[in-house]
Image (cartoon, helix red, strand yellow):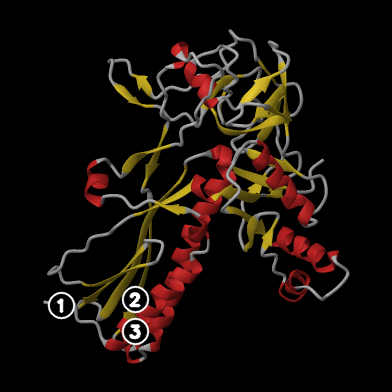
């Protein structure tokens, strides 16, 4: 038998789904990967997604020595976020059908916020391209720095996104509103009248009414890391990792465990550079002349921490390192200096190329004939919204819940970054 929803509730759900779709702003700026839900259930909601190959080229007509195996890198992606908004209407409150629609609207807003927040936080916590600005948000020049670091490292020019926290966004809008000293162009008018930036330096910009605050680094000066060939901190990408029992499993090459002189007061999220370790263009492998930026993912012990991205210099040459080299070392040393970039606590402004972040929509199955009415809808992004209601005869109340199920993965942290202002 078909679910029997009163007409006013059905209309309210349709409107709620439409508004939910409009509210998932961040989801529109990430790629969507739809999975086979049966396979996901059987694999504990995890699937490994491939990272793009980086090819090599060689000079000369005789390529005999260059036919070497290629290393395909993959990253784990999981559907791990389940959020529900439950509410109740009594038998007297049900006389006002408007309340159901208003409560659904509030539930939709909360779930949309949850999805937006997971996308924003993944970018903010795992982005490894770090732009440090010593002054306040000032507009075009700041965004141009984000574009420059992406250009230098070979990140695609299209589908670039920058999310500003509200204070920095309006600061940038103020700059653009007066930059031309004239109101005869749409950019200035939009910035002045609506506080809207729009497209700036190749980035689609938008404000965040919430944000992740990165605390000032507590590690201070004096922490060092070995960049010697035999120092144990030069990373070699691998497709598979062999376990103690000989079993093979995919390797997550986004992270590396490194040994440093001390991790005292170092915390996850800290951003840093390493002396004379410069970033390279990922395809040409030419040095950008700019220090490579890294993020602390976890502190593991008094002298070890997990960082992203791994240090791939190809100074101990092999095929995989040549393929995925991301930096070059100028002067190797047993005590290369680590310099932290987040010197003042500030809200971060995440930026990324759309293909770096991926949303995995999940599905919830509520069987028929179990005493509950169910309605489901899917947004253009593939995100499912499930409305369930059930009458409780003991309390004479109607129980509602609105559910969403999804996952977010940062497939390539080197195509994701943060910009922080007012740093010393």
In primary-sequence order, the first of circles 1 and 2 is 1
Q: How many labels sit on residues?
A: 3
Q: Which residue is mark 3?
A: 11
Residues under labels 3 and 1: Cα distance?
A: 17 Å
Q: In the image as oriented, which residue stretches furthest toward the front?
A: 61
Rendering coords of residue 118 (x, y %): 49, 53
User: Which tag is nearer the camera, tag 1 or tag 2?
Assistant: 1
Q: Nearer the viewer, residue 157 or 356?
A: 157
Residue 99 appears anywhere in the view: yes
Q: Is residue 83 above or below residue 57?
A: below
Q: CA distance from mark 3 to mark 2?
A: 19 Å
Residue at the image point whose x is 63% and y is 36% from the top:
153
Q: Give the residue pinned by disc 1.
A: 2
- The quarter of the rendered structure image containing the N terminus is bottom left
Q: Residue 321: x percent and y percent? A: 52, 20
Q: Earlier in the sequence, mark 3 or mark 1?
A: 1
The residue mark sitting in front, 3 or 2, is 3
Classify 10 Å Cα crowding around label 1: few (below 14), some (14-19), many (20 and above): few
Circles 3 and 2, Cβ within 8 Å, touching? The answer is no
């Amino acid at each position: 038998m078909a679910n029997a929803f009163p007409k006013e509730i059905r209309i309210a759900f349709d409107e709620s789904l439409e508004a939910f779709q409009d509210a998932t702003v961040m989801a529109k700026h990430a790629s969507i990967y739809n999975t086979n839900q049966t396979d996901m259930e059987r694999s504990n909601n995890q699937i490994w997604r491939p990272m793009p190959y980086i090819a090599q080229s060689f000079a000369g007509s005789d390529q005999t020595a260059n036919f070497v195996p290629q290393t395909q890198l993959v990253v784990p992606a999981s559907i791990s976020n389940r959020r529900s908004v439950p509410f109740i209407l009594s038998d007297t409150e049900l006389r006002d059908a408007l309340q159901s629609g208003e409560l659904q609207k509030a539930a939709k807003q909360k779930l949309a916020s949850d999805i937006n927040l997971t996308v924003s936080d993944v970018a903010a916590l795992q982005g490894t391209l770090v732009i440090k600005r010593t002054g306040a948000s000032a507009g075009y020049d700041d965004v141009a720095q984000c574009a420059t670091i992406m250009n230098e490292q070979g990140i695609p020019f299209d589908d670039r996104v920058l999310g500003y926290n509200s204070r920095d966004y309006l600061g940038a809008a103020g700059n653009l509103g007066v930059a031309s000293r004239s109101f005869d162009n749409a950019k200035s008018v939009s910035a002045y009248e609506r506080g809207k930036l729009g497209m700036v330096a190749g980035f689609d910009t938008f404000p965040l009414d919430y944000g992740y605050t990165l605390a000032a680094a507590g590690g201070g000066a004096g922490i060092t890391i070995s960049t010697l060939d035999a120092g144990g901190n030069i990373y070699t990408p691998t497709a598979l990792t062999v376990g103690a029992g000989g079993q093979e499993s995919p390797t997550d090459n986004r992270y590396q465990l490194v040994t440093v002189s001390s991790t005292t007061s170092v915390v996850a999220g800290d951003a840093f550079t390493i002396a004379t370790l410069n970033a390279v263009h990922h395809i040409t492998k030419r040095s950008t002349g700019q220090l490579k930026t890294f993020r602390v993912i976890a502190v593991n012990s008094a002298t070890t921490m997990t960082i992203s991205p791994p240090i791939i210099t190809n100074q101990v040459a092999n095929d995989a390192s040549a393929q995925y080299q991301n930096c070059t070392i100028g002067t190797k040393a047993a005590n290369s200096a680590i310099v932290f970039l987040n010197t003042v606590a500030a809200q971060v402004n995440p930026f990324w190329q759309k293909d770096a972040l991926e949303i995995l929509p999940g599905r919830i199955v509520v069987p028929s004939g179990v005493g509950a009415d169910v309605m489901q809808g899917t947004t253009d992004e593939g995100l499912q919204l499930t409305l369930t209601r059930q009458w409780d005869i003991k309390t004479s109340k109607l129980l509602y819940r609105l559910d969403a199920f999804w996952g977010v993965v940062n497939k390539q942290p080197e195509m994701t970054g943060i910009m922080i202002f007012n740093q010393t």
